[in-house]
Image (tube, helix red, strand yellow):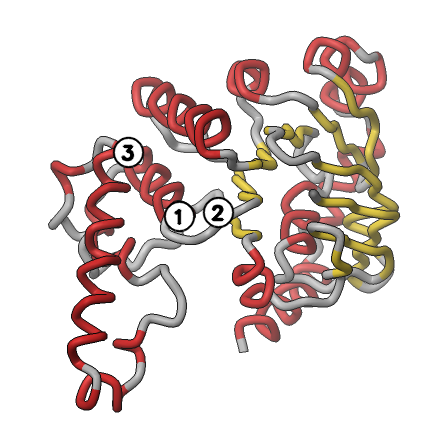
Amino acid sequence: MLELDNIVKAFGGFRAVDGCTFSVNKGEILGLVGPNGAGKTTLFGVIAGALQPTSGTIRFLGEDVTHLSTDALFHKGLVRTFQIPHEFHRLTVLENLMMVPPNQPGENLFANWLAWGKVRACEEEVRARAVETLAFLELTHVTEERAGNLSGGQKKLLELGRTMMTDAKLVLLDEPAAGVNRTLLRKLEEKIQILNRERGYTFILIEHDMEMIEKLCQPVVCMAEGKVLIQGDFHTVRSDPRVLEAYLGEPAGAEREQAQHDPHIEEVREQELHKEDL
């Protein structure tokens, strides 16, 4: 489904991603792990189109999508969530879901005047899908609550729900366990498994919670210093001496993490992300 071939992403002279190559098959939940500063989130940005790779090739469903924008990839079924949820905090939970489906006729000013019946029918269809999604996520009790008032775990469930409002084929989940209590985390794991097994979703999951990785992911890819260190099943990856060395914090890894937060590198990264927003 997704093929990465020698992906490099450099900010000035610093290579945040340095020659990453791996593939994701349809129906997998691939776990992407590695110490802080390994380049995981930067790689997510490249895959999702928020950052343009310096070199290398990305193929999605057999098509070269290396230089496609985030919105173009969204329409092809490649979507992502964020470590810090990006909800519309003043809108209700229901409204947050209803905003997701693209090309709604109500987005056209003239359609609201000249084709109001079509607009209303589409809105009711979207509303029904959103209500069904909230029921699946067990969030019906907060349907009319402002999204900004939700707990961290509820916001992560809402982010997952927004991917369900699209025709998503591949979903990139960036640290879904971060800031989530254990009760809601178990629920989140359950929903991901159901979407994978019963609805055919394919996932790539960045996570530091190894219990979650062990439960959900096969295969697992470990990154260190911008490179793919090893790919395999969870137990093979966890017991590999190179992985243990990377997590225990060799000096090169500490220097790399410090370099990632260099003000100049941060400025270059923000400029690139801002260009995508424009």
Crowding near the residue tagged with mark 3, few <14, some 14–19, many ≥20 C-alpha atoms within 10 Å: some
Q: Is residue 143 above or below residue 10?
A: above
Which of the image's four quarters has the N terminus? top right
Q: Which residue is mark 2?
A: 82
* Residue drawn at 39 percent across, 54 percent down: 86
Mark-to-mark CA distance, 2 and 1: 5 Å
**Mark 2–mark 1 CB contact (< 8 Å):** yes
* Residue drawn at 24 percent across, 66 percent down: 122
Q: Which residue is mark 1?
A: 85
Q: Is residue 140 above or below residue 84?
A: above
Residue 12 in percent (x, y) is at 82, 64
Q: Please name whichever residue, 74 or 209, is drawn nearer the observer in this view of the structure.
A: 74
Crowding near the residue tagged with mark 1, few <14, some 14–19, many ≥20 C-alpha atoms within 10 Å: some
Three-letter amino acid code at the position of disc 3: Leu
Which of the image's four quarters has the C terminus? bottom right
Three-letter amino acid code at the position of disc 1: Pro
Of circles 1 and 3, the one toward us is 3
Q: Nearer the N terminus, badge 3 or badge 2?
A: 2
Residue 16 in percent (x, y) is at 77, 49
Three-letter amino acid code at the position of disc 2: Phe
Residue 208 in percent (x, y) is at 57, 26
- Indicate the quadrant where residue 191 lies: top left
Q: Which residue is mark 3?
A: 137
